Image (tube, rainbow, N blue to C red):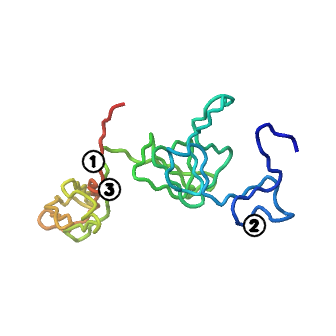
């Protein structure tokens, strides 16, 4: 083994703790260069970033002032090639990526230049189908459907807590013939309709409303 100046080298397996590293091999089958540390482990600044053990592995900014470090790294952790997280990943401030592929992405606010989704093409197996989200100056929801021989539209039950009733707008499209349909009133989580001379109503509807469970969207901000 080469001699080191001012350093130590472990030629076999290195274990800190009392555990048995089954996945790293035991005894004659121990993998050279493998290491088990039962943790917690702190790397980097020992004072400012972590005051109590918050994870098995805690990586803080570099504190090494060795002059042989050509440039001080700005990253606490850098993974080349691939990294895998099996359960949950939390990013408190900023996540930047050229491409993210995931089954589920959950976040409070999603900001993007465009918002697309891509799925297998339903009729052309050799292609993908890409759609984009509509854009508008509000956080809104909608419901749509058809009214046949009724004079009211029942809104979804959860709208009673989800939307601001004063923002409801209704679009109606008569089917078959003109019926002079109007929105008579909105209340009790319903839209009440009226037609000319009581003609049976047959129409499509499309209803929008602004959510009240989130902040009002600010559409113009400083660059």
Number of numbered discs on residues:
3
- Please tell me whether residue 109 is drawn above or below residue 22 in the rendered image: above
Return the x and y of residue 31 as percentages of the image width and height.
Answer: 81, 58
Q: Which residue is mark 1?
A: 216
**Residue 93 location (% of width, % of height):** 45, 45
| Left or right of 45, for residue 141 | left
- The Cα–Cα distance between marks 2 and 1, rounded to whole angstroms, is 54 Å
Point out which mark residue 184 bears: none
Tell whether label 1 touches label 2 (CB within 8 Å).
no
Quadrant of residue 186 within the rendered picture: bottom left
Identify the residue under disc 2: 22
Q: Secondary structure at mark 3?
A: strand
Q: Is residue 44 above or below residue 32?
A: above
Query: Which residue: 87% across, 41% down?
Result: 2
Circle nearer the viewer, 3 or 2: 2
Task: Kindly report the distance in space between the C-alpha atoms of the residues bearing marks 3 and 2.
Answer: 53 Å
Query: Which residue, as the protein is rendered here, is positioned at the far left?
Result: 197
Q: Secondary structure at mark 2?
A: helix
Using a 10 Å C-alpha cutoff, classify the residue at mark 2 as few (fewer than 14 neighbours), some (14 to 19) or many (20 or more): few
Q: CA distance from mark 3 to mark 1?
A: 14 Å
Number of other residues with Cα within 10 Å of mark 3, as a class: few under 14, some 14 to 19, many 20 or more: some
Foreground pick, 170 / 25: 25
- Please tell me which residue lies in front, 51 or 33: 51
Mark 1 packing: few (<14 Cα in 10 Å), some, or many (20+)? few
């Amino acid at each position: 083994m080469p001699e080191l100046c001012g350093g130590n080298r472990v030629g076999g397996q290195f274990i800190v703790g009392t555990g048995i590293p089954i996945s790293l091999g035991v005894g004659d089958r121990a993998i050279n260069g493998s290491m088990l540390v039962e943790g917690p482990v702190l790397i980097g600044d020992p004072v400012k970033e972590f005051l109590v053990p918050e994870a098995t592995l805690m990586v803080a900014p570099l504190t090494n002032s060795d002059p042989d470090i050509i440039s001080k790294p700005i990253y606490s952790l850098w993974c080349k090639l691939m990294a895998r997280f099996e359960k949950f990943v939390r990013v408190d401030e900023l996540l930047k990526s050229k491409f993210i592929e995931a089954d589920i992405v959950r976040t409070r606010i999603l900001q993007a230049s465009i918002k697309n989704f891509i799925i297998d093409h339903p009729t052309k197996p050799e292609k993908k189908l890409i759609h984009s989200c509509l854009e508008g100056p509000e956080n809104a929801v909608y419901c749509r459907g058809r009214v046949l021989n009724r004079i009211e539209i029942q809104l979804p039950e959860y709208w009673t807590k989800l939307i601001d009733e004063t923002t409801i707008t209704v679009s109606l499209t008569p089917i078959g013939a003109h019926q002079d349909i109007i929105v008579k009133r909105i209340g009790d989580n319903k839209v009440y309709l009226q037609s000319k001379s009581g003609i049976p109503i047959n129409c499509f509807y499309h209803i929008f409303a602004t959510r009240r469970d989130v902040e009002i969207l600010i559409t113009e901000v400083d660059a």
